Amino acid sequence: MQFSLGPVLYFWPKAQMLQFYREVADSDFDIVYLGETVCSKRRELTFADYFALAQMLREAGKQVCLSSMTLYEAPGELRELRKYIDNGEFLVEANDVGAISMLQQHALPFVAGAAINCYNQHSLRRLISMGLTRWVLPVELSGQWLSDVLQQGIIADIRHCFSTEVFSFGHLPLAWSGRCFTARSENRSKDQCELCCINYPQGREVTSQDGTQVFVLNGIQTQSGYRYNLINQLSTMQGTVDIVRLSPQQTGTFAWLAKFKANLDGSAPQQLSATDSNGYWLNLAGMATG
């Protein structure tokens, strides 16, 4: 089982991003995803910056994937996508079906991100025929669901052709919108947002009337209020999950990687906090802990 580091989902200053990835180069992550997946207005790092980081991380022994945006809204964003597709060196994680179409046109293999609505064996088989080599399970699906799909005849016969990855740590990316919720929370319009999401390096919390944190606002992305944490489910993933994904946190990312690796066989379980959850994986309510 390998461990991957997902793309940074929040808007961090360039200096912080560069320092973070220098630390990633020295870490035990096997696979690293790079790229802006949430909002095209976040331009602290350009494609050239991400490409240089990808080359640096490859030299450090990491397998690198370039992650596409999840919601394309303008021609300029498609021009940026073409830079990712034409990079010539690194695998691309497609988070939008438009990106899959463009990758297929160029006969390029790809990773299907968790935002791709692949919910059954027929969809998965179709994506494999289009060039999928790795599949990230949609975040709201359970371990039992994954096992059932992988046992279906049309998938079991080609199981060697692709790997399966599961988002296992971090606030779950649940939805995207044409509106920017972070800007709206500051009474700004999306066009005059002044990139205010850089002021919320872990997103902006949304609580219910009883004080429960139900969501995290991250620009146009809505995340789960509770942090998803499957550290105690690793031993049950053996045989179905090839790659465990951790989403970058402002602090503690590398410490959590060490804890995950120590508990691969279930011998070092962790006590989850009151704001951690694993409900979706266990086929429970998303905010539940089993």
Image (cartoon, rainbow, N blue to C red):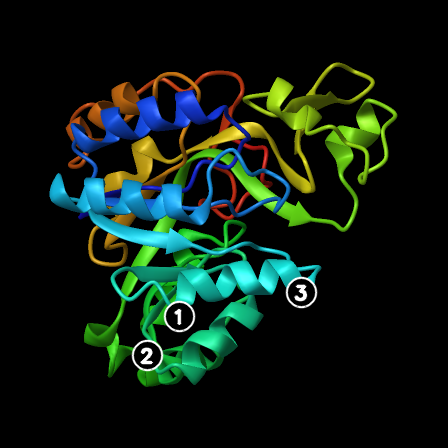
State which mark lies toward you, 3 or 1. Answer: 3
Mark 1 in CB contact with mark 2 (< 8 angstroms): yes
Q: Earlier in the sequence, mark 3 or mark 2?
A: 3
Is disc 2 placed on a helix, strand or loop? helix
Label 3 crowd (10 A; few <14 / some 14-19 / many >=20): few
Residue 237 in percent (x, y) is at 27, 49
Residue that badge 3 annotates = 75
Residue that badge 2 annotates = 155
Residue 271 in percent (x, y) is at 36, 17
**Residue 270 drawn above or below residue 74:** above
Name which quarter of the figure residue 213 lies in. Answer: top right
Is disc 3 placed on a helix, strand or loop? helix
Name which quarter of the figure residue 239 lies in. Answer: bottom left
Q: Earlier in the sequence, mark 1 or mark 2?
A: 1
Three-letter code for the amino acid on which mark 1 is drawn: Val
Q: Residue at x 50, y 23 (%)?
A: 13
Mark 3 in CB contact with mark 1 (< 8 angstroms): no
The answer for how far apart the CA atoms under marks 3 and 1 are is 36 Å
